[in-house]
């Protein structure tokens, strides 16, 4: 459908102002153990180990949830998500290296969970005794993704290609990708002409795009604060919608 836009957000340092994993580690007193194991375990396995430690200390799922609900989200980013969700023919998704429980808890706290049609991230479950388990989205042993730009647990570029394949079956859709980290470079490379990438200024994605501008086919729009994200994102969505209307 002409004029349709798919907006894909990273989560940590994009939607929220912190890293949800390290926030929980620090706020719940696990920094020393985390640092001891940091170079011994892959990130997702490390976070699963941290949740096991919290469970062994008698910490409950509700205590973890309370910790997550203290994470700050810029009010202008909240407004941007709600405005984008309200636009006709605009679909919002999240691709994140965090995990399902953390993301859903924070989004529900801010009243934003229903704004997103899909959240692609590391899956999590609460086991019978109340322990939160975190698993990799891509299993590096049974189904390695083979991308040397991404961590073993999640290739965001592969996920973008899957979204693009689904989009092509439903008609032309333009994509806007917002991110900050090293793992957001691979999906940025998958975007084509007519798409847009919004790297957060001063963060690794912005630096990588600046160092390799010829590799990026999408139009680049840098942002720093929530006000800029809101203004640029809504302008891009509205421009695409207007162009689509003029074609019909």
Image: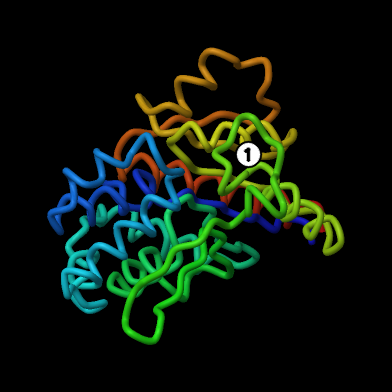
Q: How far across and how far down the image is residue 219, in percent?
A: 62, 30
Q: Check the image and report above or below for 214 versus 191.
A: above
Which quarter of the image is occupied by the N terminus? bottom right
Between 104 and 59, the residue placed more toward the observer is 59
Question: Residue at left 60%, top 67%?
Answer: 88
**Callout 1: SS:** helix
Q: Quadrant of residue 38?
A: top left
**Quadrant of residue 57 in the image?**
bottom left
Q: Is residue 28 above or below residue 212?
A: below
Q: What residue is pinned by disc 1?
A: 187
Name the residue: 42% across, 73% down.
113
Question: Horizontally, is 141 left or right of 152 in the view?
Answer: right
The residue shown at (29%, 70%) is 110
Give coordinates of residue 246: x percent, y percent: 75, 52
Vertical order, 108 against 119 (above or below): below
Residue 208's spot in the image, x, y percent? Answer: 51, 21
Query: In the displayed structure, would residue 203 be above or below residue 83?
Result: above
> Which of 76/216 is in front?
216
x, y percent for residue 127: 41, 80
* Residue count near mark 1 (Cα–Cα under 10 Å), binned few <14, some 14–19, many ≥20: many
> Who's the residue at 50% across and 31% down the image?
221
């Amino acid at each position: 459908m002409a004029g349709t836009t798919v907006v894909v957000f990273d989560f940590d340092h994009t939607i929220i102002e912190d890293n949800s994993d390290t926030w929980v580690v620090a706020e719940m007193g696990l920094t020393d153990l985390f640092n001891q194991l940091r170079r011994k375990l892959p990130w997702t396995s490390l976070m699963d180990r941290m949740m096991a430690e919290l469970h062994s200390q008698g910490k409950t799922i509700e205590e973890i949830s309370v910790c997550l609900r203290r994470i700050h989200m810029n009010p202008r980013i909240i407004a941007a998500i709600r405005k984008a969700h309200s636009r006709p023919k605009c679909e919002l998704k999240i691709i994140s290296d965090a995990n399902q429980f953390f993301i859903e808890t924070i989004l529900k706290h801010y009243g934003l969970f229903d704004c997103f049609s899909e959240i692609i991230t590391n899956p999590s479950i609460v086991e019978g005794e109340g322990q939160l388990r975190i698993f990799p989205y891509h299993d590096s042993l049974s189904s390695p993704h083979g991308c040397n730009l991404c961590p073993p647990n999640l290739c965001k570029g592969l996920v973008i290609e899957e979204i693009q394949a689904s989009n092509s079956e439903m008609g032309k859709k333009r994509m806007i990708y917002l991110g900050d980290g090293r793992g957001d470079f691979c999906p940025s490379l998958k975007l084509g002409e007519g798409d847009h990438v919004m790297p957060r200024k001063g963060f690794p994605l912005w630096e990588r795009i600046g160092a390799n501008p010829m590799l990026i086919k999408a139009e680049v729009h840098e942002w720093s604060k929530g006000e800029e994200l809101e203004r640029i994102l809504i302008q891009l969505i509205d421009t695409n919608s207007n162009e689509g209307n003029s074609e019909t």
